[in-house]
Amino acid sequence: MNPRVRFAPSPTGPLHIGGVRTALYNYLFAKKNNGTLLLRIEDTDQTRFVEGAEAYIIEAFQWLGITFDEGVGIGGEYGPYRQSERKALYKPYAEQLVRDGWAYYAFDTPEELDAKRKEAESQKKTFQYDANTRSEMVNSLTLPAEEVKRRLEAGDHFVVRFKYPANTDIHVQDLIRGEVVINSNLLDDKVLYKSDGMPTYHLANIVDDHLMKITHVIRGEEWLPSAPLHVMLYKAFGWDAPQFAHLPLLLKPDGNGKLSKRDGDRLGFPVFPLQWHDPKSGETSSGYRESGYLPEAVVNMLVLLGWNPGNDQELMTMNELINLFSIDKISKAGAKFSLDKAKWFNHEYILGKSAAELHPYFTPALEAHGVHCSDEYVEKVIDLVKDRLNFTGDFWEQACYFFEAPTEYDPQALKKRWKEGTGEKLRVIDQMLQDIKPFDKDKAHDNVMKYIQDNELNMGQVLNSLRIALVGTARGPELFSIIELMGVDEVHRRVERAVEVVNL
């Protein structure tokens, strides 16, 4: 049977890059093994639902190039794929568990539960609703059957709790961590279903995975504590459990602990794929797309946070990742996020793209500055400056002088490079450039170098002062490539203005 996997986010806010990595590993596993990947939205907790979060999740995956075979917005034979639209499915399964002795109705009020917690605290203990305490509580295990029936018919508030067998070792087989064993006495009787007709995550997740024929559950390490309950639910229903794989955490760059939005805010990097505008707080959080990252770079960076191909290769296309991916190469240990490494990946992917491919990323900056010029010219500029870009947003800063003549000059650069007599020397060089017809970059270079050598001038001082006149500061790509692309007429205008302004 070909594998079926799912990514099942809750629409409670923006998609964290840890979730993106989980979806990516599911995607690679499915593609590698001729399997199916589906997108299920787990929105049973309506109190945490955030308007726009579902659309954000879908748009993020579209940007990243992670495609789904079934699910929300796609369809498929196992739908609907939003849990809120499957509400009627879950009640019979909850009732089945009660009938079969794997669950029970609990009628404890919030006040009664709070009193139990305070009683335990007074004894320096922690209250847990479990095999040791359930006999002291208000539930269908302690109440007469007639009283249980009366309460249910009267519409009293209740929850359905799972009934763990006492003192039983539960074995979870994990593809990454091997066998994990936990004793049931350590576990609380989780709520599976509420009297408002909504299941909790645990029941809905298991029922949907079974009905959607999920064969492998690849999810974050934070779900490992829930795995014993899920294994027992499969046993209770008499269903075959899928294979589990719990992924290592993404850790903050400067210490232990899970990478959070606060870490991103504090250290200046995004933790979400796209910019997010919180409809409740009005707060805006940065995204990789808006920060100038290429989607391929984000994918490549993320996949190596917890997995490696077994060799020293770092730059890999999606097709290469699919061919190389295997779960047994996923690490158990958490992976620290590195901003420097993320920048390196993005820089490498920018270098690997043609000027035509990069052009659309730079169009907004050109439009914002009212620049109108040919695509050919823009792409020549891109070819000259792309090795200086870490992010697509760096383009205007690194290339603005190709479109707008400088109106001021870096005072530090002037102090270091612009000496007495510099203006006259630049006018001589300008005339030399004007005299080369047709213009030839190599000839211009040789003539200027000869002039500097013949007159025993300081090469760094002369060339950098020419660069300041053209660029506004002592930076930029190879000088004679700048001259060639600007054209000698524009060079003449800029040299004349610089000489006039700086010599005042």
Image: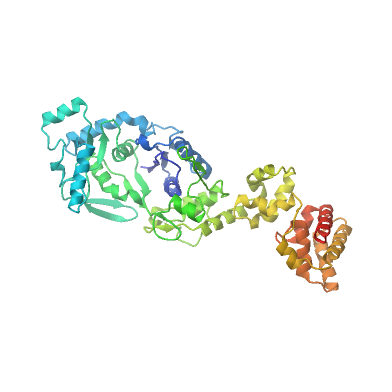
Which of 433 and 276 lies nearest the eye of the viewer? 276
The N terminus lies in quadrant: top left
- Across and down, in percent, residue 211 comes to 32, 35
Residue found at the far top of this picture: 153
Report the side of 68 relative to 126 (left or right): right
Residue at image point 68% right, 42% down: 367
Report the side of 242 relative to 124 (left or right): right
- Across and down, in percent, residue 45 comes to 35, 36
Residue found at the far bottom of this picture: 456
The C terminus lies in quadrant: bottom right
Report the side of 365 relative to 332 (left or right): right
Which of 6 and 61 lies nearest the eye of the viewer? 61
- Across and down, in percent, residue 55 comes to 48, 36
Report the side of 393 relative to 140 (left or right): right
Residue at image point 12% right, 34% down: 143
Which of 399 and 264 lies nearest the eye of the viewer? 264
Q: Is residue 466 above or below residue 237?
A: below
Numbered-mark total: 0
In the figure, residue 200 lies in which quadrant?
top left
**What is the basis of the colouring in this image?**
rainbow
- Across and down, in percent, residue 372 comes to 74, 42
Tell me if I can see residue 129 in this picture.
no
Tell me if I can see residue 378 in this picture.
yes
Residue at image point 51% right, 40% down: 62
In the figure, residue 449 lies in which quadrant?
bottom right
